[in-house]
Image (cartoon, rainbow, N blue to C red):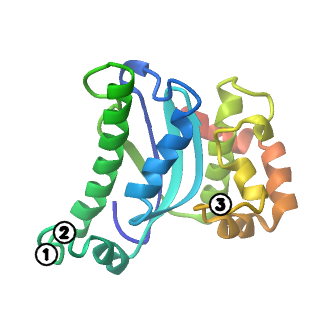
């Protein structure tokens, strides 16, 4: 992963195991993301579903990342930027896994490795991907309507509560809240073509 680029990252539990054992695990997962990854990568959209997750993010600038690690990691100024980015993600996944293993008396890896990532290179794909991620709960039969699923960023984009999400930017991509809702509700064959590529 490289600075100032958008990525769709996704992963699932090893051998299809649930990543989220109970309701409290969902906000805890996001809390860990905010702690370890947010300093190196902004978050735009997410969907968390029992045994897998999807996140759309943008890696911050090299200067921002190095500033975050200054004084925290030896030789930060000479480490390849890719190594510092990887460190953030490794810390995130490891921290969440350790807590789940301790809490639920399990051992070994929790996530499949390595986590999957695809660089997002154009704006049309970007908006389609956001709809795909939010509609993942519908795709897997958790809900019939995207607005009914509590563990995605869909509703967060539509309210005014404080958030770590880049909400303003996402809504601007869609041209406003009304268009955001309408396009998600009309999500059709164009977006569902992505089903062949992702979880």
Farthest residue, direction front: 103
- Residue 190 appears left or right of 126: right
Quadrant for the N terminus, please: bottom left
Q: Distance between the residues labelled 2 and 3?
A: 31 Å
Q: Mark 3 points at which residue?
A: 124
- Residue 137 appears left or right of 74: right
Q: In which quarter of the image is residue 65?
A: bottom left
Give the residue displayed 75% in from the left and 63% down from the top.
174
Instruction: Name the spot of residue 110 as percent of width and height, x first.
Output: 34, 28
* 25 up-or-down from 91: above or below: above
Tell me the element at label 3.
helix
Instruction: Name the spot of residue 172 as percent of width and height, x first.
Output: 73, 70
Q: Residue 151 carries which label?
A: none
Instruction: Name the spot of residue 22 as percent of width and height, x first.
Output: 55, 25
Q: Mark 1 points at which residue?
A: 78
Farthest residue, direction bottom: 63
Give the residue displayed 69% in from the left and 69% down from the top.
168
* 190 up-or-down from 19: above or below: below
Instruction: Name the spot of residue 175 as percent of width and height, x first.
Output: 79, 68
Tell me the element at label 1.
loop
- Residue 79 appears left or right of 1: left
Q: Quadrant of residue 64?
A: bottom left
Say whether residue 186 is visible: no
Q: Which of marks 3 and 1 is in front?
A: 1
* 103 up-or-down from 61: above or below: above
Q: Which mark is residue 80?
A: 2
- Evaluate if marks 2 and 1 touch, with contact meaning CB atoms under 8 Å apart: no
- Give the mark nearest the N terminus, 2 or 3: 2
Give the residue displayed 53% in from the left and 54% down from the top.
56
């Amino acid at each position: 992963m490289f600075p100032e680029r958008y990525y769709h990252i996704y992963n699932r539990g090893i051998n299809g195991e649930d990543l989220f054992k109970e309701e409290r695990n969902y906000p805890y997962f996001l809390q860990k993301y905010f702690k370890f990854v947010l300093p190196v990568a902004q978050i735009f959209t997410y969907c968390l579903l029992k045994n897998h997750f999807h996140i759309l993010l943008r890696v911050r600038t090299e200067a921002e990342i190095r500033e975050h690690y200054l004084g925290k990691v030896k030789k930060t100024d000479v480490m390849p930027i890719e190594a510092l980015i990887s460190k953030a993600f490794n810390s995130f996944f490891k921290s969440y896994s350790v807590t789940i293993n301790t809490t639920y008396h399990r051992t070994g890896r929790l996530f499949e490795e390595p986590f999957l990532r695809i660089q997002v290179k154009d704006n049309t794909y970007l908006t389609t991907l956001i709809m795909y991620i939010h509609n993942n709960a519908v795709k897997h039969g958790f809900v019939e309507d995207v607005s009914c699923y509590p563990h995605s960023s869909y509703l967060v984009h539509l309210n005014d509560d404080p958030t770590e999400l880049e909400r303003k930017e996402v809504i601007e991509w869609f041209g406003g809240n009304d268009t955001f809702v309408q396009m998600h509700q009309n999500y059709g064959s164009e977006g569902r073509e992505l089903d062949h590529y992702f979880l």
